[in-house]
Image (tube, rainbow, N blue to C red):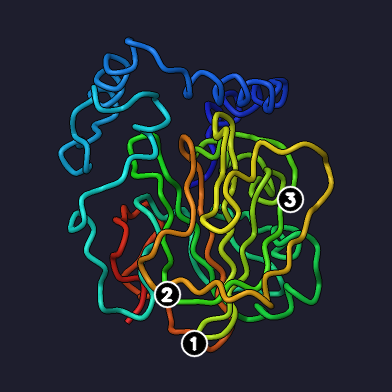
């Protein structure tokens, strides 16, 4: 779908917002303990269609802060993990998917961007994914916001890449070129039985925190330089379906696989909804 005039008008105003300042305010507000929290959860759930009955704690009064609700844990069988080799890491909507061609992946119809920039400008890291495949999944405010492994893997490295915090809603993805490679993000590189896999957790405005299970809260950080952490000598192995991180508010996960990994299903299309654990491959 090509961008409309409305998309450009909505996106244009975001350039002038103090992205990080707004997000830090949201960070603090969503962690305030208040008697108003249950009411806020009830209003939010009705507005966005959140099914609280799928949560371990379906009662709004059981959450001390809004962030506790937003990163809520689901009941054990709420998201069964398919037997396929690769499964969805999140609840969300497919933005784009396809092959890595000439070092680029698709952002929106007719708009490509650099995989090397997305992964932090590390040429040797990017080279591993030449002729590979990717899938970009957008999480809306209504979605479950914990992120799980699409297949089993050993953590090799983690990279924090500072950047802007543009909204990653459809109107901005359609209009702001290279948005995923411009926004703040975490790149987690795993070795799997299918070869290397990169999981890119993209921040966005109001995404005031990104966490991983092995490093805790990574954003909001101080500093404006790319930070790499080597985990190759540590025994951090995560099984398919196991939690690897979480977002606060909506954002995007991008999976990148090397050439030779199981092919993503031909039945998957842009704008298709997904649930955690649904099959992405055969």
The disc label shown at residue 79, or none: none
Return the x and y of residue 240 as percentages of the image width and height: 38, 72
Identify the secondary structure beneath mark 2: loop
Which residue is found at the position 52% from the left and 26% from the top? 6
User: Mark 1, residues whose alpha carbon is within 10 Å: few (<14), some, or many (≥20)?
Assistant: few
Rendering coords of residue 256 (x, y %): 56, 69
Residue found 79% across the figure and 77% down from its top = 124
- The answer for how far apart the CA atoms under marks 2 and 3 are is 24 Å
Q: Which residue is mark 3?
A: 161
Q: Is residue 266 left or right of residue 248?
A: left
Marks 1 and 3, the one that precedes in the sequence: 3
44 and 2: which one is in front? 44
Question: x, y (%) of residue 53?
Answer: 15, 38
Hey, which quadrant is residue 264 in on the image? bottom left
**Discs 2, 1 touching: Cβ within 8 Å:** yes
Query: What is the x, y in percent for residue 273?
Result: 31, 52
What residue is shown with label 2?
Answer: 151
Position of residue 155 relative to residue 142, above or below, is: below
List the residue tagged with mark 1. 193
Q: Is residue 62 left or right of residue 231?
A: left
Label 2 packing within 10 angstroms: few (<14), some (14-19), many (20+):
many
Q: Residue at x 58, y 54 (%)?
A: 107
Q: CA distance from mark 2 to mark 1?
A: 9 Å
- Name the outermost residue toward the front: 234
Of residue 6 and residue 116, the one placed in the foreground of this image is 116
Q: Secondary structure at mark 3?
A: strand
Q: Residues within 10 Å of mark 3 (few under 14, many from 20)?
A: many
* Residue displayed at 30% across by 71% down: 279
């Amino acid at each position: 779908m090509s961008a409309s005039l409305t998309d450009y008008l909505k996106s244009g105003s975001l350039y002038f917002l103090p992205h990080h300042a707004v997000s830090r305010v949201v960070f603090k507000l969503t962690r305030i303990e208040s008697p108003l929290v249950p009411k806020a959860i009830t209003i939010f759930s009705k507005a966005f269609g959140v099914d609280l009955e799928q949560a371990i704690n379906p009662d709004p009064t059981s959450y001390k802060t809004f962030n506790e609700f937003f990163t809520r844990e689901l009941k054990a069988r709420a998201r069964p993990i398919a037997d396929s080799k690769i499964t969805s890491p999140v609840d969300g909507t497919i933005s784009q998917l396809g092959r890595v061609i000439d070092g680029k992946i698709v952002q929106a119809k007719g708009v490509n961007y650099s995989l090397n920039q997305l992964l932090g400008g590390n040429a040797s890291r990017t080279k591993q994914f030449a002729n590979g495949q990717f899938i970009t999944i957008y999480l809306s405010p209504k979605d479950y916001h914990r992120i799980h492994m699409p297949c089993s893997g050993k953590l090799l490295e983690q990279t924090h890449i500072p950047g802007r915090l543009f909204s990653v809603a459809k109107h901005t993805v359609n209009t702001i070129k290279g948005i995923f490679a411009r926004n703040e993000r975490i790149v987690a590189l795993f070795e799997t039985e299918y070869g290397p896999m990169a999981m890119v957790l993209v921040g966005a405005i109001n995404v005031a925190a990104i966490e991983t299970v092995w490093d805790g809260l990574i954003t909001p950080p101080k500093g404006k330089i790319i930070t790499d952490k080597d985990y190759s000598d540590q025994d951090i192995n995560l099984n398919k379906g196991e939690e690897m991180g979480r977002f606060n508010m909506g954002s995007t996960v991008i999976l990148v696989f090397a050439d030779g990994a199981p092919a993503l299903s031909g039945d998957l299309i842009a704008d298709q909804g997904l649930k955690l654990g649904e099959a992405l491959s055969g």
